[in-house]
């Protein structure tokens, strides 16, 4: 069966599900359907009505969710339940052995994933058993018994291994549990010699007997396998060794490996191909027109870059300290700039002259003082407002400007209150002059620039 053909059938089923508005109770995983409990339970209940199930003693069921109710029916009927190990990684089958005098709830617990691990007994290739009935899952199935699985071939491989063990034969009944929309026409040419056909189809609404005429697999077809598959499924290695001892042809697919010696060891380890060394280009040692090699030119260019770096050293980034500086300059340059800034302020600050206005009314707003200063043309360069302490400080550029403003401020009244105006002494630092006059710290001073109209 080709992958493209299987995908077309799966797309058809998906379209039917969408048309039937079936969304809840269905899961899509890796392009395949898993039939859930709500609908599959009704289909599995039809298993109890089959005469082949009533007369069977040992039933092998794939423990997928659609077949969960079938496992419960088998346990409750006190039949022997066999389930395959997940992906055949740890053996072939597990025989579920429930505890003695188990209640109905305990029997159902045995069918869960944890219960199968707790009450499962491994069954190997040397186990003597006879399986009477098989229940498998399907993605699609036809009324003629042609079945399409999930695409990985584990159900077909489990059947073929059990044939090699003698546990099943051509007369063993195979049943599948599906939804009604999964029953459709499948061309016979899509079914290979390794595909398992089914004898009964159980849906929520009907029971279909297929009367399939195609023969079931007679064992493992080794030509369809490769060393990768044997590496993933250890039990295939053991079976291959046993069949090789019996004189059977166990040659793997010719398209995978041409020489495949088989030993009598119980397991065959697949060897991984050696990792090829990473290709690296050779260094170019050709000479240029002047006779120097390319490598020498690169070294010369590197030396020139180092000399250039020495002439222009990189700027060193410094973290910002308490003074708020964020600069990439060296520490020496920062100190030099600080000294220059101090000298500049020392030259600039003495040129500013302060005038203090005292006994300012408490209800006066700073905007009213600014308006009054503009009207008398005594606008300062800076204004320090201390209305809560009933005083303000006016800063002017020089002593001459301060004298002119002092004359204009004589007799100034604010909101009907006379204020006192006096000229402050010229001091070296602006902050010192403010602090010595009993003013608050500079952090509490509001500096406001007053612009003249």
Image: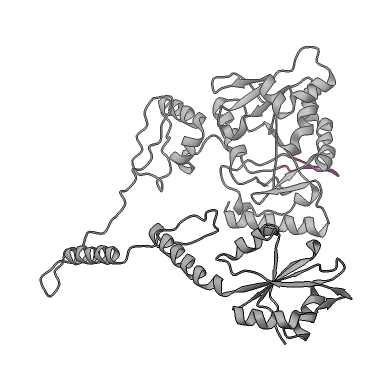
Q: Quadrant of residue 387?
A: bottom right
User: Was residue 50 drawn as part of the magenta stretch in this picture?
Assistant: no
Q: Residue at x 65, y 55 (%)?
A: 187
Q: Residue at x 47, y 36 (%)?
A: 230
In this picture, which residue range is highlighted in magenta?
200-211
Front residue of this view, candidates 413 and 317: 413
On screen, residue 221 versus residue 380, left or right, reads: left
Determine if residue 379 is in view: no
User: In the image, what residue occupies the spot 72% across and 58% down?
Assistant: 12
Task: In the rendered view, tell whether residue 5 sits above or below residue 79.
Answer: below
Residue 21 locus on image (x, y percent): 83, 56
Q: Residue furthest top?
A: 100
Coloration mode: one colour
For the point 69% across and 19% down, the residue is 119
Q: Nearer the viewer, residue 306 or 131?
A: 306
From the viewer's perspective, tell me whether residue 350 is left or right of residue 26. Answer: left
- Based on the displayed image, in which of its 4 quarters is residue 451 positioned? bottom right
Q: Position of residue 207 (x, y in %)?
A: 82, 41
| Residue closer to the observer: 336 or 162 | 336
């Amino acid at each position: 069966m080709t992958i493209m053909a299987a995908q077309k059938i799966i797309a058809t089923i998906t379209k039917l599900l969408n048309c039937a508005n079936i969304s809840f109770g269905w899961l899509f995983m890796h392009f395949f359907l898993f039939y859930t409990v709500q609908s599959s339970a009704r289909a599995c209940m039809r298993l109890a009505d089959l005469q082949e199930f009533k007369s069977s003693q040992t039933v092998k069921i794939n423990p997928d969710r659609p077949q969960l109710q079938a496992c419960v029916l088998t346990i409750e009927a006190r039949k022997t339940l066999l389930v395959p190990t997940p992906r055949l990684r740890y053996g072939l089958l597990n025989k579920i052995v429930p505890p003695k005098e188990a209640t109905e709830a305990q029997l159902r617990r045995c069918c869960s994933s944890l219960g199968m691990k707790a009450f499962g007994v491994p069954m190997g290739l040397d186990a003597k058993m006879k399986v009477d009935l098989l229940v498998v899952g399907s993605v699609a199935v036809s009324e003629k018994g042609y079945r399409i699985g999930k695409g990985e071939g584990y159900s077909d491989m489990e059947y073929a291994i059990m044939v090699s063990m003698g546990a099943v034969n051509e007369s063993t009944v195979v049943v599948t549990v599906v939804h009604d929309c999964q029953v459709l026409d499948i061309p016979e040419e899509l079914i290979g010699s390794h595909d398992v056909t089914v004898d009964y189809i159980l849906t929520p609404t009907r029971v279909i007997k297929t009367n399939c005429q195609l023969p079931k697999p007679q064992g493992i077809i080794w030509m369809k396998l490769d060393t990768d598959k044997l590496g993933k499924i250890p039990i295939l290695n053991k079976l291959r060794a046993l069949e090789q001892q019996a004189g059977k042809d166990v040659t793997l697919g010719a398209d995978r490996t041409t020489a495949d010696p088989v030993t009598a060891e119980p397991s065959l380890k697949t060897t991984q191909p050696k990792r090829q060394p990473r290709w690296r280009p050779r260094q170019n040692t050709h000479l240029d027109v002047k006779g120097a090699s390319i490598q020498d030119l690169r070294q010369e260019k590197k030396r020139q870059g180092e000399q250039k770096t020495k002439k222009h050293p990189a700027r060193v980034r410094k973290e910002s300290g308490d003074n708020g500086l964020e600069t990439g300059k060296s520490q020496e340059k920062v100190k030099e700039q600080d000294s220059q800034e101090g000298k500049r302020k020392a030259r600039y600050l003495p040129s500013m002259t302060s005038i203090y206005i005292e006994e300012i009314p408490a209800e006066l707003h700073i905007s009213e003082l600014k308006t009054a200063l503009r009207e008398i043309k005594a606008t300062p360069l800076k204004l320090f407002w201390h209305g809560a302490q009933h005083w303000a400080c006016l800063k002017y550029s020089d002593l001459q400007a301060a004298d002119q403003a002092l004359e204009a401020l004589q007799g100034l009244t604010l909101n009907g209150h006379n204020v006192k105006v006096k000229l402050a002494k010229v001091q070296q630092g602006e902050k010192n002059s403010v602090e010595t006059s009993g003013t608050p710290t500079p952090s509490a001073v509001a500096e406001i620039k007053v612009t003249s109209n």
